[in-house]
Amino acid sequence: MKRLIYICLLLLAGFQAPGQNKVIVESIRSFSMFGPTMYYLEDTSVRSSISAKLSAILNKNYNLSFYNTSLPVEIYSNSDALKNNTAKFSSSDTSTWHLFVEIYEYDPISFLSGSAIETSDTAIIASASTVIQISCILTNGLQQIINNQSVYAAVSNTETAGFGIHPKNIFLTKKSFASVVHVGLQMALDPNNETLVADIKAPAVFYSDNFMMGQIKNTSKILVQTIKDSWSFSLMENAEVLRMGEQLFDEIWIKRKLVDSSASELLIKKIKETGNTASSDFIFLRQECRDVYQDKNYSIKIATEIDPYSEATSKKEIFSDFLPGQVHMMLQGKDTAAIFAINKMIGDPYKQVYLDKTTNGIDSSSTAKVSKKDYPFQITYDYQLSGKIRGVYFTINSFWNHEMKEIYLNNRLIAIVKGKIDPENFIITKDLTDSIMMKELLLIAYNKFLL
C-alpha cells in the first residue's frame, strides 16, 4: 500500500511541475551576393543538421523545447527581396517562444565598405574569400526580445588533397557550409558570447566533373613552388627544379629566303601553302628553358606567321597565328626531342564540368547541388598539342581558359596539371614511368607563347 501511494505522489508531482516552453523557428532568411552558396539550404541533410543543432542549443541555453518539424527556409535571389520583410509571429500562445534567423553571404570588400568593424577584425575579413553573417533574434511568448546577436564568419580556403576546378563564386563545400552555420548559431544564440568575427579556414571547393574526379583516388597531389621563373616540386621521390628562360624569336623566311637551319621540309611546305611568303614574316617564337638538376637546356620553337597588315592590337593576337601541322619542336642542344602540331578550340563531347554541383575534389559522395537547374559545361580545348616526344606519341590538352592541362603518352593519361601561367599543382597517374619525359612535357605545356 505504501508503494502505491508513493508512485501516485510521484505522478502528481510530475503533473504539477511546469513544463518546458516551446520555441518556433519563424523564418530562416538567406541571401548570397555571389549566388549559389545558399542553395545548400535546400539539401535535406543540411536542413536536418541545422534543425538538430538549433534544438540542442535552444534546449541548453534557454531550456526550450524545439517545436519545428521542418525549417521555414527562404532563399532570396536579390537584395531587394529582403526589404520590407517584417517579422511575423505564427502563434499568440504566450508560452511559445519565437526565433528568427538570417544567413547572408557578402563579398569581403563590399562588406568592409559598409561596416564599422574594429581594426583587428577588419584585417581578418580583408584576407577572407567570403563573409557569412548569421543573425538570430529570439523572443519570449510576450514577443519581447530575449537575444539579438549577429556574428560574422570570415572564411578563407586552405590547400587540401582535393583536385579539380575551383569555382570563382563558391567558397564552401556542403559539409563546410553546414559547419559554418552551426558555429554561427552556437555563437549568436549564446547569451554570453563576446565574439563578433570568427576566422574560419575551410577546405577548398571544386566543381564536379566526369573525367578528373576519379583520378585523385589513385594518386596524391603534387604541389609546385614557383619562385620567379623556377618551379620546384617532387616527382617519383626526386626533388626537381625546372626553369623558364628568355622569350626570343628567330627568322625563318625572309622574301623567299630560308634563314633558319632547323626548318624542316614540312615547315617550308606549310609556309608556301599560306600564299603569303611575299608579304608575311615567318618566325620561330623561341622559349629557352632548363632542367636544373639534370643540367639540360632546351629550346621550344613555335613556327608562326606574322601578317604586317594585321589589325591585332595585342601581342597575344599577333603571335597566335601558329602554322599548321607538326612544325613546332623542342630541341635539346642540336637534337630534336619533340615535334608537335598546335590546334585550337577543339570540343570534346565526352568531358563535362557540372557548374551546378560542388565536391571536395576527393570523394564523389561529397557532391552537392548549388542550383535547381542542371548546368553541364562541355569542355573545349583552348589548344591541343599533339606529336612525338623521343619517339613516343603525346597529347597536351589545355582547357578552362588555360587553367587546366591534361598530358597523355600513347593515348594514356599520365598527368593533369592545374595552373594558368605556371604549374601550381598536379596529379600523376599510375601510367607514368619516365620522369624526364614528364618534365619535358611540362616545359612544352607551359611555354609562355601559348597563353
Image (cartoon, rainbow, N blue to C red):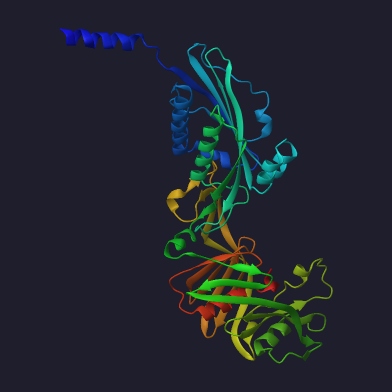
Q: Along the horizontal axis of the image, is 268 left or right of 429?
A: right
Q: Is residue 29 visible?
A: yes
Quadrant showing the C terminus: bottom right
> Is the residue 389 above or below the residue 355 in the image?
below
Query: Where residue 159 appears, x then y in whole percent?
Result: 55, 57
State the residue in front, 200 or 383. 200
Residue 275 in view of the camera: no
Q: Is residue 350 above or below residue 442?
A: above
The answer to which of 123 and 363 lies nearer the viewer is: 123
Give the percent coordinates (x, y) of residue 348. 55, 63
Taking the spot 62% from the left edge, 72% from the top edge, the residue there is 231
Total numbered circles: 0
- Give the quarter of the image for residue 423: bottom right
Q: Report which quarter residue 395 is drawn in.
A: bottom right
- Quarter of the picture containing the N terminus is top left
| Picture coordinates of residue 67, whole percent (x, y) | 44, 22
Position above or below: 147 against 329: above
Does 186 sit above or below residue 120? above
Residue at image coords 51%, 73%: 235
Query: Measured from the top left, where is residue 79 in percent x and y?
Result: 67, 33
x 54%, y 23%: residue: 99
Q: Residue furthest front?
A: 2
> Quick check: 256 left or right of 74?
right
Q: Is 70 positioned to the left or the right of 255 in the image?
A: left
Q: Is residue 5 left or right of 124 when viewed as pictured?
A: left
